[in-house]
Amino acid sequence: MPENYDVSSGDDPNRKPTGDDPTGEADRPTSSGESAAASATSGESATSAADATRPSTPAPSTGASQDSPAERTTQISAEQLAAGTGTAAKTDSAASKDSEPDLAERETRPAMSTQPPAADGTQRIEPPEAEAERTQSIPKVPADEGHYASPTDFLGAPGFPGSATDRVEQPPADQTPTTQAVAGSFAQLPAEQTQYSGRQGPYSNQQAQFPTEQTQFPTVQTGFPEADAERTQNIPKVPAEPSPWATGFAGGIGGGFAEDPPEQTNAQRNRRGLIRGGIAAGIAVGLLTLLYVGDLVFSSGTVPRGTTVADVQVGGLTEAAAQRKLREELGPNLQEPVQLKAGDATATISPEQSGLTMDWPATIEQAGEQPLNPFTRIASLFTDREIYPVSHGDEQQVMAAVEQVKPKLERAASEGTIKFEGTKPVAVEPVTGRAVDVSVAADQVMADWAKGGPVQVPFNEQAVNTTSDGVHQALRNVAQPAVSGPVSVKGEGHDAALAPETIAAALRFEPDGKGGLRSHLDAPTLVGGLEPQLRDTMKPAKDAEIVLEGGGPVVRPSLDGRGVNWDKSFEKLDEVVKQKQNRTLQAVYEQQPPAFNTDHANGLGIREVISEFKTEGFETASGVNIKRTAEQVNGAVVKPGDTFSLNGHTGPRGTAQGYVESGIIEDGRPAKAVGGGISQFATTLYNASYFAGVKDVEHKEHSYYISRYPAGREATVFQNPDGSSVIDVKFKNTLASGVMITTEWTPSSITVKFWGTKQYDVGSKTGPRTAEKPPHEKVVPPGEPCSPSKGTGGFTVTDTRTLKDVKTGKVTTESPSKTVYNPQPIIHCGPPPAPR
């Protein structure tokens, strides 16, 4: 038991007890390997025996002040624990096995005080102090909760390896090692108090346990003059295996040491982490497996989770419920017209007329079965999977429906340009074209019509060559300056002016191939605005004329004129109109020859009649129209190589031109129209050209035969109200001379003559009538326009022309022309006559 001391007595708490062994004999191992102190049968008896044989040698003073309890505690040398006290500790530990049940009894036993030995070596033992005194005089060490003092905390403390106070000296061979106590260090501890592990090394991984009473002992300085090797050999070995009481160090000496847990290597920590991670992973896998199996069971037989059809959620429903939901939510809208959209254009078609129907079972079947992949099932909790409605339709019906609305979806490409609203120029933005392929559009309709919303119809974009920037640049640089004011045109005698309105009407724009616009002025429009103003400053030229005088053709000579050369006058106009000032133009005058001069007229060889043809018999209204046509054609000159067109020469034949309504044939029966009866003039003109020997370019016979015309050698004409030609009479002058056409009209006949230089004697051979067909009767209901007719039979006939050159006598026979006449029906107006 540690000694108690009285604070008031002046005892040095670091003084070594008088009963200690100054020679260290008690700590030296015996022949059996144990220390002398370990031979005692118990921890307490071993201590008494040791104390009885130790001389009481006071520790020399170090001159240092007394250390505090904490400082004294940290001055315990590791070598002293291993060498000075380790041996006794082993013995004490062995002895404490038997006496450990009496620990409470030992703690309450009175502490014995030892005195320095007498001269005879006998140690005197003072009576123990009272328990309370002993307890009160032990300084308490504050408990440091949660802190473990590692044995390495004592490195450098006085009396431990590495301490400045630990001085080991090798004594001479004939000297005995001496032990000196230094204040603040531990002396040899009683065996019953020193229990610690006997692991190899100066410290044990297990903590030593000491009684909670703090004990202060003086530090022992031992001088060993041995060599390092001998000193090392004198250090008692610590058993490799820890003793059963190794954990007894946890309380420290006198309660001054906290428990230090054993150090762990990285491999141990990694192994423990892997074990814990494996356990956690196993638990997680088990839980996920249970969830997975449960999810499979509960979702069996339903549409996969997250499935949508046209934004309708059907996931988790049975197939029947999913079909029912689709019919309820999508069905009503499928009866509405389907909107088609191509760009910004829209149109609609009817699903019923297009043959479009829904297939609900096939739609749900697309979703498939519940997936077994756990990752897919987890992902379905957070995502949706869209499946498309399955529909059926007749492709031809859908294509026909799209074809009907195609004009609404398509758009022609439009180049950018500039138009004028009066005299204000306005930019017209370029627009790309849009073309729709009907078959591709039909496929898209069948695929998307049931999804809801417009069906986006694919289309091909047609590019343009202009850009918006290019158009606006032309607007600023050309159009706006051009109409900013009039352009003055100086003539010979007086001036004229091009008004902004005329310039705006004449200004034209076209793509320049670089994204912009190229401008030019239309000369005829400009001339039309200036010529009336400058007419009295000009003298027009006069063409030569061929007229009939004295029964024959006469050439009236041409006259030269003086006028404005418009091309030269307008050469600088494009630059002038872009200027806002100095907008003046000089008209350029020059001599102007006639287009058909005297020499040209005489050189045509128009001297004699080379052919003529006459027809008779026409009603009064038809006679008016025939006379008007004859007036327009009379005097027409056809130069060698030129082609004459009746429709082209007369132009439109309407009331404005002096024509009236007369009889025509429409849909095989008689009718009326303005300009009717002209076919008789056309037949007369065709026959005159036929016998003149010129080349037939175009003619068409009537659909049924008219008796006043030669069979297979007659013609009709027709034109639209705007004057465009539908059926015409054309011929080409293939003669060496020119041809002049003259006409002679009477109220009952029309004659057409061709004048020139005779080249051919022309003959005609008409074949027999074949394939004759009798007429049939036709009744026109009352109230409808009707012209009664007796009708004529139909037949087929051929005509062959021969040409004999009047100079060479060569005869040329042309291929026969075949004409088929349909029967002219017998027309009855109103109810047919009663049978006789």
Image: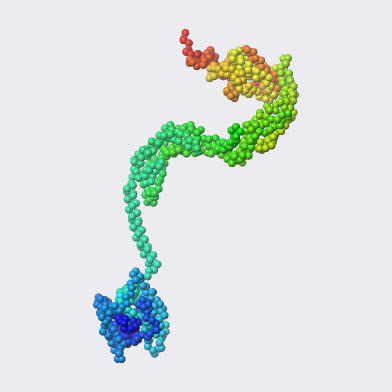
Nearer the observer, 106 or 7:
7
* Residue shown at 51% from the left, 36% from the top: 436
Residue 459 vertical position relative to residue 828 in the rendered view, above or below: below
Q: Position of residue 529 (x, y in %)?
A: 66, 29
Where on the picture, by quarter, is residue 569? top right
Single out the residue that lies furthest toward the front. Answer: 8
Colour logic: rainbow
Residue under the image location 66 percent in, 24 percent down: 643
Lateral position of residue 259 relative to residue 564, left or right: left
Q: Is residue 79 in view? A: no
Residue 330 in sight from this viewpoint: yes
Q: Answer with left or right where residue 404 lies relative to residue 68.
A: right
**Which of 766/340 is in front?**
340
The number of discs equals 0
Residue 650, image x, y percentages: 63, 21
Which residue is drawn at the image coordinates 41% and 39% (left, top)?
Answer: 390
In the image, residue 659 sits, relative to residue 516, either above or below, namely above
**Of the pair 112 and 200, the residue shown nearer to us:** 112
Give the farthest residue toward the bottom.
119
Q: Which quarter of the figure is the N terminus placed in?
A: bottom left
Q: Can you give x and y, in whole percent of width and height, for residue 649 in the image? A: 64, 22
Residue at 34% across, 54% down:
288
Q: Quadrant of residue 179?
A: bottom left
Q: Quadrant of residue 206?
A: bottom left
**Percent of width and height locating residue 143:** 33, 72
